[in-house]
Image: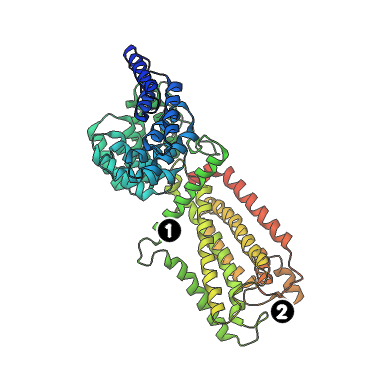
Amino acid sequence: MSADPEPQAPDAAARARDAVAAAEGRPADIPLQLHAAEALFRAGDAAGAVAFGQKAVALDPGHARAARVLSGLLAAAGDADAAVRLAREAVRLDPANTEARLHLGALLAGRRRWREAAAHLAVHVESASATAPVWRLLASVLHQGGQDARATEAAARAVEAEPTQIEYRLHLASLLCARGMFADAAAQLAAAQALEPDNPMVLRMQSGSLAEQGRLSEALSAAERALELAGEDADHRADCRAHLAYVAGLCQVPVAADPGRWQVRPPRPSSCPSSRHPGSLWQDVATRWRVIYAIMLRDIRTRFGHTRLGYFWAIMEPIGHLMTLGTVFYALNHAPPPLGNNLFLYYITGLVPFLMFSHVSHDMMGVAEGGNAMLQVPIVRRTDVIVAHAIRQLATELVVGIIIFSTAGVLGFQGLPADPVAAAAGVLLLWLLAIGVGVVNVVLSGLFPSYDTFYAALIRLLYFASGIYYSPITMPDMVRRWLLWNPVLQGIDLFRSGFFSQYEPHWLDVEYLLAWVVASIGIGFAAERALRFHLAVRA
């Protein structure tokens, strides 16, 4: 059923009057009530159509078709909640009705309930009545729900069903680009261009794909050609002009002297305008999270997808590191542990939080170089890549810690912290400190390419100055006073104070550690925002 009633016509009005008369003559006949409702809708009387639909449902609440028809009428009348409720009821009453599934899926998609919509649309596309537009809708819903692989498959089915439809090929190409499958995307764009050589949107998307690959000169040429072909179409011209300004900003093209041509102004330091999406705060947060989640998945595939072990290796590598170091120091040192009853466990309680800090803070410097391809996608911000790196690394280190301490518990040693809140606070504050230091590292490595070497040396120094293999209480007073300025040592001791019940270091200063966290995050993100444009140029 269409979204809006058709304009009233004399023949439609006459048929509606006849249908109403028949329905009123037999008020208990559900098909006649539904026929009158549909006739009134086509005649432009939405209120009257809803009234007859409600009569049909009232006659038999278990009538699937009545629920489906009334749902469509209510959706057209703007009552989305009631429309969804009745559409669910229609599917419940007749689960095999694929048309009802399509109707409910479309309504749920309109309400941004992506996963529920995908579940019902997936049932419909398995039927013989599946069409290219439905495959296209399913692809969009799956993409919005974060299921890009399935979205690509659905978009490919839409192209198979209607290979001459340019929009379907463009949509498939955009999904392929988002997954980094640029060769497949180029094939779709080439096929679209063969169908319509002068379609500006094909060239616009080719330009975007080239920009994502770092081929900025070609991207700029394609963007210029797209604007030329846009002609007088206001929507296409505005889209092509905005994209051209974005690509030109990446290439640092100066403002055109000829006012008749397009004019490019370098992007403002804040961000590209196209990276902002209208909507509520929660919609913006949801968009940012989808971007961050996509970056994490891409990062995992890029780093570990080429090995048979995959992401399992990301977990086993630090475990091997911890086991090797802990075993070596345990074998070399036969003295009693400063805390607890096992020297190996004492080493591990220092190594696990320190390696989390070092990995997060050092790994972020790759954003300035390895993240460039992602940063050329308009919706992606440098902060998205930073947060994605931090969350992925935290998840990895938490899994490593759980495995290590669970193994200790199985072997009969202490496997759980005595004060879980204090231990968790130590991990959380060290992670936040690593993010702040990592963002500062991103800025400094973008400004000074040799900074990476300096920070690697600093990490090695911190390795021996953070109390991993010793307790500060064993140090001379003068040495301990200097060591306590190290916020990483403070974080490790906070974690150990939560792990070992008898450990209550009098030098522990949580406020000092928290001040480091706030200062590093504030300075880091402020510097990144202020120097964002300069960092993009240097990278």
Q: In x, y percent, where is residue 178?
A: 38, 46
Front tag of 1 and 2: 1
264 shown above or below 489: above
381 shown above or below 489: above
Which of disc 2 and disc 1 is earlier in sequence? 1
Q: How is the image coloured?
A: rainbow
Give the amino acid type for the residue marked by disc 1 in the picture: Ile
- Whole-number angstrom distance, CA of label 1 to CA of label 2: 42 Å
Q: In x, y percent, where is residue 369?
A: 46, 52
Query: Which residue in the structure is indicated by mark 2?
Result: 474
Of residues 469 and 305, the one nearer the viewer is 305
State which quadrant residue 515 falls in.
bottom right
Of residues 334 and 59, the one nearer the viewer is 59
Residue at the extreme top:
10
Give the amino acid type for the residue marked by disc 2 in the picture: Thr
State which quadrant residue 33 falls in.
top left
Judge whether residue 535 can be spotted in this image.
yes
Query: Which residue in the structure is indicated by mark 1?
Result: 300
Which quadrant is home to the N terminus? top left
Q: In x, y percent, where is residue 39?
A: 35, 21
Neighbourhood count class around disc 2 (C-alpha, 10 Å): few under 14, some 14–19, many 20 upward: few
Q: Residue at x 40, y 23 (%)?
A: 234
Of residues 370 and 98, the one nearer the viewer is 98
Secondary structure category for the residue under label 1: helix
Judge whether residue 215 can be spotted in this image.
no
Of residues 397 and 482, the one nearer the viewer is 397
Secondary structure category for the residue under label 2: helix
Neighbourhood count class around disc 1 (C-alpha, 10 Å): few under 14, some 14–19, many 20 upward: some
